[in-house]
Image (cartoon, rainbow, N blue to C red):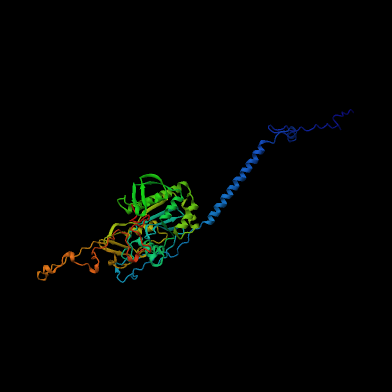
């Protein structure tokens, strides 16, 4: 039998396996070095990207660390635990001569505890004349850090207060505290509590130099001056020389805007409007920038020159919260009342009690319980007389300073028989003055400027005729 060797018992020689062809764009590793080719560019780009990623991560980590430190550093202020104020209608008057007024309405919420909204902070901002110790700019506000809404209410300096003394104005309170026990701000805070029905959380008392320094610290302010402002007083080295229109103001120029009042038909009320508009302009510029320029320097000046109960941490807290606001959520209001009131020749602003309570509850009250007449100590005046929510007029209605011109009644004509002989009457030029002094005038002193204070409220430093502060009437242009 023929056997074919190629079919049985024989093995075909194995062919060597073919190496896969190199892919396009790639060079075999064992030939790269031999050929002296450079390392691929992709690897260099990868290292650069990796380095850039590391740098970005480091920067982000640093930012997060700073933000975390900042949030740990800032701190909200402590809140008062006193709740709503309570003024007893049967409270003993401050003076034996205090006169009674109609009984105030009863509080429908009497006995109900008031709950404080933890997101609403209340504040007081005051412009102080450190010569006469008058607080002639008074603003009370509420800042909701949840909705980031800010309400600010201006209280006129001539607002009638239920206090003793012959001049009963709100701008007297700081001065009386200084004279009483040196605590001007404490007396002012007590008066503000009587006005709004609760204690504010924080306060800031700003004087002339502090205001100038603060505005300069932020690099000045762009402001559209509403009217031409020209005023010169060499006795206090005061010059206000500003044209109407948009311009960049330094601290010194800004204080002139805040002081000027003679160009407004409504005088002090016109100035309040300008002050509110000016502060709104500053706030809008900060919010547009998204930052407060030179914030650290601003805080340093604030803590050094401003009388406040806020710490640096509190200021940082409010600064961050403020920058989360929008201009549309910042609102300014003015206390409702009779701005043309006058008592015995002295100008006053008499609060409209019902409208004021409504404004307090709508824009200022941080409690869930409304403020009523039982929580405030308000005194108002009208042609029909006085009304006090506390049931009395401190010092009595006759305690007000009388600045009305005196009109002495004519002496009765002596009878003809009682007339001395002409020779017995000395000539008018021969009449001696008593004790060698000129006869006293029977006219009342000219103290009707609205800023006069009585003996018990005399400043510890004798004020000049023009105290020279931002907001006093005598110092205004």
From the viewer's perspective, is 254 left or right of 433? right
- Residue closest to the far left: 417
Residue 262 visible in the displayed image:
yes
Residue at image point 68% right, 36% down: 40
Where is residue 241 shown, x and y percent of the image? Answer: 36, 47
Residue 463: give x, y in percent of width and height.
35, 60
Direction from residue 471 to residue 436 in the image, left or right: left
Drawn side of residue 274 relative to residue 430, left or right: right
* Quarter of the image where the N terminus is located: top right
Q: Nearer the viewer, residue 341 or 264?
A: 264
Quarter where residue 138 is shown: bottom left
Q: Position of residue 430 (x, y in %)?
A: 18, 66
Closest to the observer: 275 or 254? 254
Q: In the rendered image, which quarter is residue 123 located in? A: bottom left
**Residue that protrudes farthest toward the right in the picture:** 1
Could you tell me how many numbered marks the image carries?
0
Residue at horizontal 17 percent and vertical 64 percent from the top: 428
Residue 119 appears in the figure: no
Percent coordinates x, y for residue 151 in the rendering = 40, 54
Left or right of 239 on screen, residue 75 = right
Residue ID at (18%, 64%)? 429
Nearer the observer, 150 or 347: 347
């Amino acid at each position: 039998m023929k056997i074919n060797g190629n079919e049985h018992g024989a093995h075909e020689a194995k062919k060597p396996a073919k190496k896969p062809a190199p892919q396009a764009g790639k060079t075999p590793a064992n030939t790269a070095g031999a050929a002296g080719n450079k390392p691929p560019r992709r690897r260099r780009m990868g290292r650069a990207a990796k380095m850039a990623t590391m740098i970005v991560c480091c920067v982000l980590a640093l930012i997060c660390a700073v933000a975390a430190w900042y949030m740990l550093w800032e701190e909200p202020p402590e809140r008062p635990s006193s709740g709503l104020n309570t003024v007893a209608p049967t409270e003993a008057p401050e003076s034996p001569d205090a006169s009674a007024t109609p009984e105030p309405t009863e509080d429908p919420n009497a006995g109900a505890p008031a709950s404080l909204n933890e997101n609403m902070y209340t504040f007081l901002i005051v412009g102080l004349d450190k010569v006469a110790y008058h607080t002639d700019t008074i603003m009370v506000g509420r800042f909701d850090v949840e909705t980031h809404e800010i309400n600010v209410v201006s209280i006129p300096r001539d607002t009638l207060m239920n206090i003793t003394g012959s001049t009963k104005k709100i701008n007297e309170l700081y001065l009386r505290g200084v004279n009483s026990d040196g605590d001007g701000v404490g007396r002012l805070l007590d008066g503000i509590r009587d006005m709004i029905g609760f204690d504010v959380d924080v306060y800031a008392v700003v004087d002339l130099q502090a205001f100038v320094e603060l505005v300069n610290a932020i690099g000045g302010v762009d402001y559209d001056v509403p009217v031409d402002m020209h005023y010169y007083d060499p006795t206090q080295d005061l010059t206000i020389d500003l044209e109407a229109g948009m311009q960049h103001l330094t601290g010194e120029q800004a204080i002139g805007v805040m002081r000027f009042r003679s160009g407004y038909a409504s005088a002090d009320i016109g100035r309040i409007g300008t002050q509110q508009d000016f502060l709104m302009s500053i706030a809008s510029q900060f919010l547009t920038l998204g930052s407060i320029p030179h914030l650290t320097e601003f805080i340093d000046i604030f803590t050094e020159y401003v009388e406040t109960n806020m710490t640096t941490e509190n200021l940082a807290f409010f600064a961050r919260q403020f920058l989360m606001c929008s201009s549309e959520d910042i609102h300014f209001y003015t206390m409702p009342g009779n701005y043309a009131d006058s008592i015995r020749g002295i100008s006053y602003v008499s609060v409209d009690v019902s409208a004021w309570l409504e404004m307090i509850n709508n824009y200022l009250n941080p409690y869930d319980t409304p403020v009523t007449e039982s929580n405030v100590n308000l005194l108002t005046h009208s042609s029909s007389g006085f009304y006090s929510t506390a049931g009395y007029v401190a010092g009595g209605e006759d305690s007000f300073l009388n600045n009305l011109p005196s009109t002495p009644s004519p002496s009765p004509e002596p009878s003809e028989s009682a007339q001395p002989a002409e020779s017995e009457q000395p000539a008018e030029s021969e009449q001696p003055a008593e004790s060698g002094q000129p006869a006293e005038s029977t006219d009342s002193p000219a103290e009707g400027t609205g800023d006069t204070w009585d003996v018990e409220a005399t400043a510890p430093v004798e004020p000049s005729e023009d105290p020279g502060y931002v907001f006093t009437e005598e110092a205004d242009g």
